[in-house]
Image (cartoon, rainbow, N blue to C red):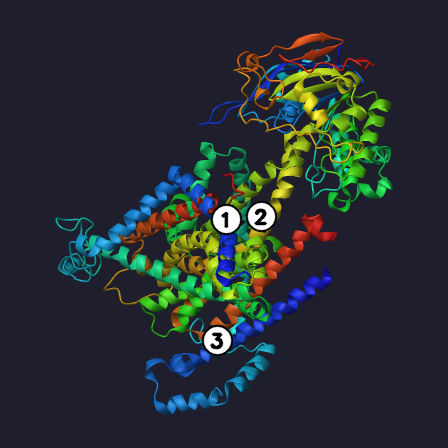
């Protein structure tokens, strides 16, 4: 298990190196290069040359890459040019990451809390109206563009439910501890601040949850259908166990194996979805920074955030694989 | 009074858009307390469906069960789902064919044994664990305390089947149904498991319904034998009578198709021709007629009725095999 | 003596035996699909979509780039022209006929979906076939590359690729949406090839000395078609939705003279609350078409999966 973890982490380092090299090369390959990107339309030959020298762009690309790596190791990923001009890219990430984490966490909780029970019920009523409607609904969930749904929630549902549609928290006096606004409110016992932050999370989290929900639902349904056909469920019935025991211990326990993997893979959809959702709700997270970064071509920020997104995605999937061993003894005891 | 009285048990599978399929057709048999009764036949003859119907394990949708299954005077088919759950595992135990797939792969063997004790005898977890260890010991699993914490994939095939037997017998049911319990096992292990079953039912006084396609199993274990064909009992007899003088051509064929080591070299095997038909044509004549060497014209016109031919034997045949004259018939 | 021709005949027979299963599976899948209301719903939706998009130049009453109603927009101070004679859905904020734009938009949407899928498929086919058929170090290198691509969430990768282009246009959108599908197709084909490399009919063909190229193209590829068709159908839906997301982030095609649904939807984000109908029509079209492709893809998958009972 330990060796497996270490091997995966080494692989991750490799992936990050290759990816950073690719991204780095891409930055340099841009039409006009980063100098044009930085100076925009107003560049003069003189100012271009000065900046080229200043950025060390007259050196060979590998030298530049290793210099970049050296700086990156000391935490210097360059300075934002578009998202928060003048701020260090790393600061932007650190400051915004808790927001996205909070949002994604709530979204995945919603997806699991709704998707798994619904998937189980649909499987138990296979072919019935409940099954057909929920399967249809989950297919629809995948077909709706996330940002469109976010706008519909924002414009239609928010007034009906009286929920806020912009930002992470109203301008109230709240103490900052961890950067997770809801958690901060709980720690400092500023309950109104926690509640306010939570209210700001609800609509974007629902929008963000649709795709993982649809996938969790369908995988749960398929897995439960498979497990219900298994011999050991019949054995459990032959023991006269109560229906809740069979459901919990024999059916769901086994059906969870593929679902857990799926949840790991859905982190990817969450990260991409966060870019769209956070933009709609002006939610100051990593996703919004990426959205602005793409729009304004803020390459230092994009480079760092994309690498970070990759690391998060790979690490989450590693954690999922490890937790897999916890539920499946066939892997643990091998 | 018999422990189990199965009367006219009929199971019809109905699927939307398909013709209803009668898997079990008016099957009747008795099981006395402590007796071992065999249900024998090829796959598809309805023997497994019979056992699932007795246990109340057929899907509620799609399977129509009629007739009666009296267990100690109570018709199991008329019980509610909850009443039946109370009886399964407590009054009736069941052992299935494939021991690997019949055990839950992700929870320890111990829990799979104790959960049935906790459910029916209200035992606290600790006491149930001790009892479970004793049970595993009784079914011949060495080092039972350690095995309790292990998972099914860590046990050998024979050990798994022993564990399943321990689970089925945990609450000392008066009736055990074993559905092809040795088919998925190696030949050497098969003999061990059969010996174990035989010993356990004798010691505990449990009645056993043994479902098998293997006449060797019947020979070693059963008191009474019911031979099923196409969802109906075609011959019923005591084990000795059946082996000494099979009367139904199908039974005769089953016995003749067993390869014998002491047969002269070059002698051909005698398989039964053809295979079990998908839909059961008992409506017009005898279902076995298309494969029967003794077929007469009447066999394809008139459905044979079940007749009592004495010595506790029942037979459903127009033109039975004549018993060998030179040999003693009943033992 | 066994002449080469006779040997070939024998192999062909063997291969036929192997793909016989494939043919009967396809036949039985078709029988299932023909009676499946879900599949037929999807097929009707997609059939209509393709028909409309092919005929749209003749169906559209007006030029989609002609600001013929601009006077009304100006007079009403940035209100969209109402529904009126000859303009069944009114106009947009540039005074162009909205109904014509939706019709013509279907054509561009189809082009984006189909081209993106074809490019993704071609790339994946090349990589996956190389990896799966040759194995060894080729397999390792290709699969490492695929893994790096897969370790970035796909939509995020599409965003990043789009941002590479200083001036996005119709084709950069297609490329961005297509490239992220390459690793998926590559994995799929490699998996299928690997499974077949150890299957009986391929082993038999190898044992009889058939050239590797012939084995790959005549025996292995045709048998991988099922999963590829299913995936392609699903990618058609994803591509259209992803293209909309690109436009929404300002990474889409800025030239809106020839409209595309994703672009129409992504471009109206700033007026969503004041003119929701400008978003609802293209969004509705995207949802219906994506649903159509998904319904077809999912039912195809079920029908082609021999294990599937659902």
Spatial separation of the CA atoms under disc 3 and disc 1:
34 Å
Residue at figure coordinates x 34%, y 65% from the top left: C252
Are labels 3 and 1 on one chain?
A: yes
Rendering coords of residue C200 (x, y %): 58, 53
- State the SS at label 2: helix
Spatial separation of the CA atoms under disc 1 and disc 2:
9 Å
Residue at figure coordinates x 35%, y 59% from the top left: C114
Q: Nearer the viewer, residue C39 or C212?
A: C212
Whether residue A238 is visible, yes or no, is yes
Establish if B133 lies above or below A261: above
Direction front: furthest residue: C1
Establish if A76 lies above or below C197: below
Rendering coords of residue B225 (x, y %): 73, 19
- Classify mark 3: residues with Cα within 10 Å, few (<14), some (14-19) or many (20+): many
Disc number for residue A300? 3
Chain under label 1?
A: A
- State the SS at label 3: helix
Residue at figure coordinates x 73%, y 11% from the top left: B313
Rendering coords of residue A25 (x, y %): 48, 78
- State the SS at label 1: helix
Mark 3 or mark 2, which is nearer to you?
2
Disc number for residue A259? 2
Of pointers 1 and 2, the one earlier in the residue sequence: 1
Rendering coords of residue C224 (x, y %): 48, 55
Chain under label 2?
A: A
Query: How many numbered discs, if any?
Result: 3
| Mark 1, residue position | A215
Residue A254, image quadrant: top right
Of pointers 3 and 2, the one earlier in the residue sequence: 2
- Classify mark 2: residues with Cα within 10 Å, few (<14), some (14-19) or many (20+): many
Could you tell me which quadrant the N terminus of chain C lies in? Answer: bottom right
């Amino acid at each position: 298990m330990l060796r497996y973890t270490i091997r995966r982490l080494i692989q991750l380092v490799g992936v990050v190196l290759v990816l950073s090299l690719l991204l780095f090369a891409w930055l340099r390959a841009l039409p006009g290069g980063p100098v044009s990107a930085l100076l925009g339309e107003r560049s003069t030959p003189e100012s271009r040359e000065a900046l080229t020298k200043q950025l060390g762009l007259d050196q060979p690309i590998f030298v530049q890459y290793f210099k970049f790596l050296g700086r990156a190791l000391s935490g210097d990923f360059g300075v934002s040019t578009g998202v928060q001009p003048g701020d260090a890219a790393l600061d932007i990430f650190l400051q915004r990451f808790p927001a996205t984490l909070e949002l994604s966490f709530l979204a995945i909780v919603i997806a699991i809390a709704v998707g798994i029970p619904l998937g189980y019920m649909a499987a138990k009523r296979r072919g019935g109206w409940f099954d057909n409607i929920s399967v249809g609904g989950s297919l629809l969930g995948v077909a709706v563009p996330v940002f469109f749904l976010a706008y519909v929630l924002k414009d239609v549902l928010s007034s009906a439910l009286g929920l806020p549609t912009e930002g992470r928290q109203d301008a109230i006096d709240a103490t900052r501890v961890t950067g997770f606004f809801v958690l901060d409110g709980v720690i400092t016992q500023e309950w109104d601040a926690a509640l306010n932050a939570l209210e700001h999370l609800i609509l974007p989290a629902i929008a963000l949850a649709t795709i993982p929900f649809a996938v969790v639902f369908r995988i749960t349904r398929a897995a439960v259908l498979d497990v219900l056909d298994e011999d050991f469920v019949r054995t459990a019935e032959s023991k006269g166990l109560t229906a809740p025991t069979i459901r919990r211990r024999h059916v769901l326990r086994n059906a969870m194996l593929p679902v857990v993997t799926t949840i790991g893979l859905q982190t990817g959809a969450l990260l991409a979805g966060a870019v769209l959702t956070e933009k709609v709700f002006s939610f100051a997270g990593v996703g919004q920074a990426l959205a602005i970064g793409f729009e304004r071509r803020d390459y230092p920020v994009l480079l760092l955030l994309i690498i970070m997104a990759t690391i998060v995605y790979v690490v989450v999937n590693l954690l999922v694989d490890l937790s897999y061993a916890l539920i499946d003894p066939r892997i643990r005891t091998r | 009074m018999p422990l189990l009285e199965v009367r006219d048990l009929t199971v019809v599978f109905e699927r939307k858009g398909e013709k209803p399929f009668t898997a079990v057709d008016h099957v009747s048999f008795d099981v006395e307390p402590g007796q071992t009764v065999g249900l024998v036949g090829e796959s598809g003859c309805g023997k497994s469906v019979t056992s699932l119907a007795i246990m109340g394990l057929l899907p509620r949708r799609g399977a129509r069960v009629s007739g009666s299954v009296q267990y100690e005077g109570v018709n199991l088919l008329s019980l509610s789902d909850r009443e039946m759950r109370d009886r399964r595992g407590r009054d009736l135990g069941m052992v299935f064919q494939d021991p690997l797939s019949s055990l839950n792969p992700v929870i320890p063997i111990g829990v799979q044994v104790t959960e049935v004790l906790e459910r029916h005898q209200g035992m606290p977890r600790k006491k149930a664990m001790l009892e479970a260890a004793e049970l595993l010991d009784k079914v011949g699993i060495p080092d039972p305390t350690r095995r309790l914490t292990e998972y099914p994939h860590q046990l050998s095939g024979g050990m798994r089947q022993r564990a399943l037997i321990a689970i089925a017998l945990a609450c000392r049911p008066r009736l055990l149904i074993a559905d092809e319990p040795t088919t998925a096992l190696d030949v050497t292990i098969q003999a061990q498991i059969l010996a174990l079953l035989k010993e356990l039912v004798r010691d505990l006084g449990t009645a056993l319904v043994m479902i098998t396609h293997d006449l060797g199993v019947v020979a070693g274990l059963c008191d009474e034998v019911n031979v099923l064909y196409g969802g109906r009992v075609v011959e019923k007899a005591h084990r000795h009578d059946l082996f000494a003088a099979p009367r139904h051509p199908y039974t005769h064929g089953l016995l003749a198709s067993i390869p014998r080591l002491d047969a002269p070299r070059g002698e051909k095997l005698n398989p039964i021709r053809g295979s079990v038909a998908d839909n059961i044509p008992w409506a017009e004549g005898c279902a076995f007629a298309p494969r029967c060497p003794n077929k007469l014209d009447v066999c394809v016109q008139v459905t044979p009725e079940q007749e009592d031919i004495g010595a506790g034997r029942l037979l459903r045949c127009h033109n039975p095999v004549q018993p060998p004259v030179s040999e003693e018939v009943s033992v | 003596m066994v002449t080469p021709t006779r040997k070939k005949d024998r192999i062909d027979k063997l291969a036929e035996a192997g793909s016989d299963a494939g043919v009967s599976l396809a036949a039985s899948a078709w029988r299932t699909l023909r009676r499946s209301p879900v599949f037929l719903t999807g097929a009707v939706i997609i059939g209509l979509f393709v028909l409309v998009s092919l005929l749209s130049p003749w169906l559209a009453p007006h030029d989609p780039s002609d600001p013929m109603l601009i006077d009304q927009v100006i007079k009403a101070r940035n209100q969209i022209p109402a529904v009126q004679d000859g303009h069944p859905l009114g106009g947009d904020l540039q005074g162009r006929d909205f109904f014509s734009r939706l019709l013509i938009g279907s054509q561009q949407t189809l082009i984006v979906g189909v081209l993106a899928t074809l490019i993704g498929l071609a790339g994946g086919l090349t990589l996956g076939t190389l990896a799966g058929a040759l194995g060894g170090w080729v397999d390792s290198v290709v699969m490492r590359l695929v893994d790096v691509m897969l370790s970035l969430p796909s939509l995020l990768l599409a965003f990043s690729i789009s941002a590479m282009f200083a001036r996005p246009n119709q084709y950069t959108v297609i490329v961005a949406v297509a490239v992220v599908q390459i690793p998926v197709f590559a994995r799929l084909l490699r998996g299928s090839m690997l499974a077949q490399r150890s299957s009986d009919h391929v082993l038999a063909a190898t044992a009889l000395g058939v050239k590797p190229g012939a084995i790959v193209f005549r025996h292995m590829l045709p048998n991988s078609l099922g999963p590829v068709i299913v995936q392609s159908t699903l990618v058609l839906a994803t591509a259209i939705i992803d293209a909309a997301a690109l436009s929404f982030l300002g990474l889409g095609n800025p030239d809106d003279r020839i409209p595309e649904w994703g672009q129409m939807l992504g471009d109206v984000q700033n007026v969503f609350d004041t003119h929701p109908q400008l978003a609802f029509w293209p969004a509705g079209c995207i949802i219906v078409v994506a649903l159509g492709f998904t319904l077809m893809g999912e039912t195809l998958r079920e029908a082609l999966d021999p294990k599937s009972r659902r």
